[in-house]
Structures are given as structure tokens and as C-alpha cells.
């Protein structure tokens, strides 16, 4: 979404090495695209339950920690895919093409989500519904100024930097993660250049050090920041999540080099997947540390690396064509599910029809991907900027 759901473009990698063809048909593209849908669905299920559209058990919300680990998975996946895609090509194409590609990937759908949220905000303001204003936007009466400030912050992809509910909850709450992604994109060329010049051992040490610093930062915030602010800083502040993106970059570099020298193996990928799935499940159940995503994120990196290493499908479900399509539409699903849920609640959809609402949102995300997100992305990248035709392979649409 990118991971966030935004992610990268798997099929565009043009590095100095040649990735063997099993990557294309085996696991990396299909599996890493498919898991994005499960992550986005986890977030949507959590939010629909919190909004009262679904009545899922509290055990589910506890297991997925309100969807926060799913967003961390997006951040790790984003670092991995961007590294795989742009390693060896940034120096050739320059950072400008990278930034245009990232803008084309995330901003059109981000803008569309705000347009969908517009009638919701107008309705809440014009009807003077203080309950909805407080419950959805954390605002009280006379909310025009904070609503405008929130809109400006979202338009400039800055909401995650403001630990105030009145800034990051109105319009489209999940957009806070896009401000994290925008920050990661901004530093990615520099980060890839620095880490790419180091040995894998040093990269691993840097990833471990940044992860430890993240834990120290979380402890500091939890103990010393005001209670009204610390939840947002721990869950949504871009610097708090930087470790996850760095681990994704490190995992991507390992995958690239292991493949290039022939040290990677299908069996090792299966082992990584098995260990990470068991560890993530146990950590989700017992949650020895809060937030849950902190201990889970290194295993997200292991899971992603393991899936990329597969040379043939092991989990056939992840290679199913329908699931890959849902994974491609996951970014749209992530960004439009809250505004559409609010619209359906205003329309009077009862909580016992929540599954209908979810299916409508999933269907809408597929429509948005095919009719809006993908065409506009191509237009910006290849129509306005480079005037080059879009590659025909499915890989060019991934992540």
C-alpha cells in the first residue's frame, strides 16, 4: 500500500542482474499482490466493526489489533517491492521518474477518496448532526476551520505528521498512512543508495538497529507523551513506522543478491513462510508487547521474502487469478472503504446488512482500479511524462 497499499511496480525492475523467470510465474508477483488484499480486507473488517456495520467478535479485533499490523505489513511490502523494482535503475532513470511514478500510483485514488468523502462532510455539517461529527470526525460544533485544515493536510499528504484527531480523522481517516508512504517515497532514493552500497551483514545490523530504536521511541512516547497524543504518535506518526519500511528495503536487497548469486532456494522460502506465519499468529494471540505490530513487523519481512523466493506455487490460493485481481484493487479498497461506509450509513443501511456493504465496497474497489486508478496512472506516467507505451505484462500493474 502499497503496500500501503501503494507499493511499487514489480515487473519494471531493470537492475544489473537478471532475475530468473520463476519469479514471474512462481510466487513473487502473484503471492505478494494477493496478500495485499488480505491486509486491506483486515483493515476494512476492523473499521466496519468499529462503525457498527458488522458485528464481528471482539476476539477478532484483538487478534488483528484493529488492523494496525496490516498497515505495517503494507509498509514492509512497500520497501521490499520498491527495492526490487528500482534497484539498479534509479541511477539510470533518475529520481524524477521514480517520484512521478509514485505520484501516479497513489494520488489519483487519494483525491478520489476525498471527493467521495465530500458529500458525507457536507451532510454532517448541514444537518448539524453533532453525534456523527464527533463519532466520525472527532469534531464538535463550529467545525469549519478544523475541517478545512484537515482537508489541506490530506491534500498535501501530511495528516500523519499531526497527532490531533481533529486533523487526521475527518474526510478519510485511513489516509494518514499515505502521508507515511509519501515520506518513505521522499527518502527512498537516498535510502536505497546508502543501503545498496553496504554488505548484507551491515544492512541486517542497520535494520536491527532501526527496529530497536523504534521500540525505544514507542516506549518513550507511551510513558512521557500526553494520553491524548501518544496513541496517534505510536500508531500513525511516519517516523514511528520508518523501521518497517527500512526492513522492507533490507529484505529486498537480500532477495536481489541471493537470487543473483544463486544462494536463494525454494525450500528456504517455504521455511521462512512457515516460521513467520507461526510467529505472527502466536504474537497476534498473546500480544506480549503493545502495539502488536512492533514484534510482528520483522516476521512480515520474513514472510514477504519467503513468498518472493518461491519458484513454484505452494499456497495455490495466493496464485488464483481472482485473488490477484483483488490484490491489485486493494489500494482502492483501502482508501474508499470508509467514505463509502459513511455514505451507506447515511442512506440508512442497517448493521445486519454490513456484509452487503462490504461486498459493495469490494466491488467498487475493483471498478475504481480498472476504470480510474489504472488508466489515470498510465496517463500520468506514460502519456503526460514519458510518452512511452505502457508495458503489456501483468507485472507492470502489480503493487
Image (cartoon, grey):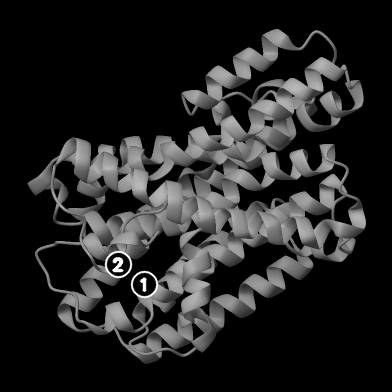
Q: Mark 1 points at which residue?
A: 29
- Along the horizontal axis of the image, is 20 left or right of 54? left
- Along the horizontal axis of the image, is 377 left or right of 341? left
Q: Quadrant of the C terminus?
A: bottom left
Residues at marks 1 and 2 touching, judged by CB atoms closer than 8 Å: yes
Name the spot of residue 306 as percent of width and height, x first. Answer: 42, 78
Q: Which of marks 1 and 2 is in front?
A: 2
Image vertical order of residue 79 relative to residue 320, above or below: above
Q: Is mark 1 on a helix, strand or loop?
A: helix
Picture residue at 50% right of the left edge, 70% below the top? 34
Image vertical order of residue 231 relative to residue 250, above or below: above
Q: Mark 2 points at which residue?
A: 395
Name the spot of residue 79 as percent of width and height, x first. Answer: 38, 54
Of residue 52 and residue 311, the one placed in the foreground of this image is: 52
Of residue 25 and residue 82, the one placed in the foreground of this image is: 25
Picture residue at 55% right of the left edge, 60% below the top? 297
Amino acid at each position: 500500500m502499497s503496500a500501503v497499499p501503494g507499493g511499487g511496480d514489480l515487473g519494471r525492475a531493470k537492475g544489473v542482474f537478471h532475475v530468473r523467470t520463476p519469479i514471474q510465474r512462481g510466487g513473487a508477483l502473484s503471492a505478494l499482490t494477493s496478500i495485499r488484499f488480505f491486509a486491506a480486507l483486515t483493515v476494512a473488517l476492523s473499521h466496519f466493526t468499529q462503525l457498527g456495520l458488522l458485528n464481528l467478535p471482539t476476539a477478532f479485533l484483538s487478534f488483528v489489533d484493529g488492523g494496525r499490523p496490516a498497515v505495517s505489513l503494507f509498509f514492509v511490502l512497500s520497501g521490499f517491492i520498491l527495492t526490487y523494482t528500482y534497484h539498479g535503475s534509479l541511477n539510470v532513470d533518475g529520481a524524477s521518474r521514480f517520484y512521478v511514478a509514485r505520484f501516479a500510483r497513489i494520488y489519483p485514488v487519494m483525491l478520489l477518496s476525498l471527493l467521495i468523502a465530500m458529500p458525507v462532510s457536507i451532510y454532517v455539517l448541514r444537518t448539524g448532526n453533532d453525534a456523527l461529527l464527533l463519532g466520525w470526525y472527532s469534531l464538535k460544533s463550529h467545525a469549519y476551520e478544523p475541517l478545512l485544515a484537515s482537508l489541506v493536510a490530506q491534500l498535501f499528504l501530511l495528516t500523519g505528521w499531526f497527532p490531533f484527531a481533529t486533523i487526521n480523522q475527518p474526510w478519510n481517516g485511513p489516509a494518514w498512512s499515505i502521508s507515511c508512504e509519501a515520506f518513505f517515497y521522499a527518502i527512498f532514493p537516498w535510502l536505497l543508495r546508502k543501503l545498496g552500497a553496504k554488505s548484507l551483514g551491515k544492512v541486517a545490523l542497520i535494520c536491527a538497529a532501526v527496529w530497536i530504536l523504534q521500540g525505544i521511541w514507542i516506549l518513550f512516547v507511551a510513558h512521557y507523551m500526553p494520553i491524548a497524543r501518544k496513541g496517534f504518535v505510536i500508531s500513525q506518526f511516519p517516523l514511528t513506522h520508518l523501521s518497517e519500511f527500512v526492513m522492507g528495503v533490507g529484505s529486498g536487497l537480500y532477495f536481489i543478491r541471493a537470487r543473483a548469486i544463486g544462494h536463494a532456494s525454494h525450500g528456504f522460502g517455504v521455511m521462512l513462510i512457515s516460521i513467520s506465519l507461526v510467529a505472527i499468529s502466536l504474537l497476534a494471540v498473546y500480544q506480549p508487547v503493545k502495539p502488536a505490530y512492533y514484534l510482528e513487523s520483522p516476521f512480515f519481512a520474513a514472510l514477504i521474502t519467503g513468498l518472493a523466493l518461491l519458484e513454484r506455487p505452494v499456497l495455490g490460493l495466493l496464485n488464483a487469478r481472482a485473488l490477484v485481481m483483488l490484490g491489485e484493487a486493494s489500494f482502492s479498497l483501502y482508501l474508499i472503504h470508509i467514505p463509502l461506509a459513511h455514505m451507506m450509513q447515511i442512506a440508512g443501511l442497517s448493521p445486519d446488512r454490513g456484509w452487503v456493504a462490504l461486498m459493495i465496497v469490494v466491488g467498487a474497489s475493483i471498478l475504481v482500479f480498472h476504470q480510474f486508478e489504472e488508466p489515470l496512472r498510465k496517463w500520468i506516467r506514460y502519456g503526460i511524462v514519458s510518452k512511452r507505451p505502457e508495458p503489456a505484462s501483468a507485472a507492470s500493474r502489480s503493487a
